[in-house]
Amino acid sequence: MVSHTPLLSVEQLSVAFNTQHNNVVDGISFAIYPGETFALVGESGSGKSITALSVLRLLPANASLTAQTIALGGQDLLKQSEQAMCRIRGRRIGLVFQDSMSSLNPVMTIGAQIAEAITQHFSLPTRAVRQRVLELLAQVEIPQPGKRYHDYPHQLSGGQRQRVMIAIALAAEPDLLIADEPTTSLDVTIQAQILALLKSLQQQTGMALWLISHDLALVSTLADRVAVMRRGKIVEAGTAQAVFDAPQHPYTQQLLNALPCLANAGKRGGKDMLQPPVIPLLQVENYKVYYPVRKGLFKRIVDYVRAVDGVSFSIAPGKTLALVGESGCGKTTLGKSLLNLLPSSGRVLVDGIELGKMSGKALQQHRRKLQIIFQDPFSSMNPRLLVGDIIAEGLCALRPDLSAAARNDRVLALLKQVGLPEASALCYPHEFSGGQRQRICIARALAVEPKLIVCDEPTSALDVSVQAQIIHLLKTLQQQQSISYLFITHDLAVVAEMADEVAVMYQGKIVEQGEAGQVLNRPQHAYTQKLLLSAPRMPVR
């Protein structure tokens, strides 16, 4: 039963930075009640995370905060000293940060990091602290807590690191847990586990949950009430059912309409049985990527990690094959190795020519036909190079026949093609948003006129509206230039929008493959069925 007295009450909160003329948070008011799940949704830059940091008074020095009140259980947080706020942070309000890898200390074991959160607020003997850490690890369902206690963050998977972050936030038994994008970039099965964990912990402890997210499907499955934020303002608020079933504000309607939908699987058009068979652009046969496991004094090979284990598939010209599966199944390894970025064995034929039998200049020219868009656009670009130089890199290497003027014209034409102004060529990567950086990476991949592009999670962690723009751009380019895509992703709704065929990968092997409509609507393999059941779905409107 949700109380009628707010646990957290925020009235007329505004935040501005000295370097900006406008408020990044502009006079917003909301309340969170004990035991409920409140979701603050919106695109990147809307002010969601700044709002949470304002409540905790963790804003940077160049930020100014004004509010009529920020009250926690009737206690005005604006009137508390910094020493008092240190007792409130963690003890009364827990926070799960977005990026678990960068938020955890890489040189401390996970046990020590959870223990630190306990000893900050409680005076307990060492044995009791250790016992509490083991209880928390068990509570967040980390397997074998006693053995994982001394592990470092890099030894855990993404889902396990997120669970450790939740354990740290729960260590002091807070009344309110703030979860800032807790499932961004996680696989659908791990995402489902984290959501189930948060629900279970909320039922056990009675805490309130403040969920910050741009994933509307996720929010629809978890939240009691929702507030939609745009450009620092809350434009719509209400119960989750009311907001998602009958959105009133045009911006909310725009966000919901931009969502990819699993129901669109197979609507890109199936195979016409009257058409003659098409010669595949890419053929992969019995393809393997093994990593040796070395042990002993002389580091002899005792086994292999079979990252990609004998897979076979083909992609026709102008078509999209989606490769789906959980992290660690071998998707990205397969994509990179196809471009000779990793050692491999097996046959790879492009336009009927086997790459393994080519070398030298012939191989270099043939590799023009294969390009890649990496998952993280920012880290895949040289931060010291101008955007124009980044796009021109491939032209310099693979089209030495072009003059400097011709290369420049090609770069400007590519920027226009991906929807960016020509002036972008003279800017650096850090000057762009995530969606714009992804457009730059698409332009770089298109520069040498490839026939196949490996898209490695190109829409991961993007807002729904930006994601819709990137999907539309990729579809348009495919129609205009008949480009083929190997689309690597864990987002099944994006697969439904993009793919002609789907291959499901599990532990290095392809366990199911077929037309998108058949695989996503009538899955045959138990693992595919599990993936589809784990995917969050919007309620039918």
Image (spheres, rainbow, N blue to C red):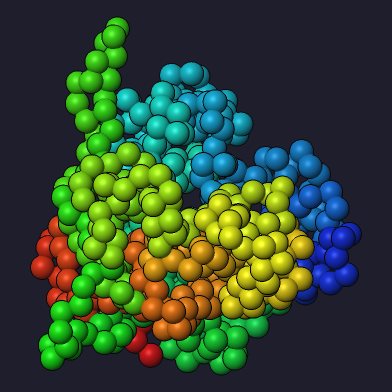
Image label count = 0
Horizontal and vertical percent position of residue 438: 56, 64
Residue closer to the observer: 235 or 364: 364
The answer to which image quadrant residue 268 occupies is bottom left
The residue positioned 29% from the left and 61% from the top of the image is 350
Q: Residue at (56%, 52%) from the top-left corner?
A: 397
Q: Is residue 519 left or right of residue 74?
A: left
Which quadrant of the structure image shows residue 46?
Answer: bottom right
Q: Position of residue 289 (x, y in %)?
A: 26, 41
> Which residue lies most toward the top here?
297
Residue under the point 17% across and 54% down: 285
Vertical order, 250 against 486 (above or below): below
424 relative to 318 in the view: left or right: right
Outermost residue, front direction? Answer: 401
Q: Is residue 236 in sight in this rendering?
A: yes
Q: Nearer the viewer, residue 151 or 411?
A: 411
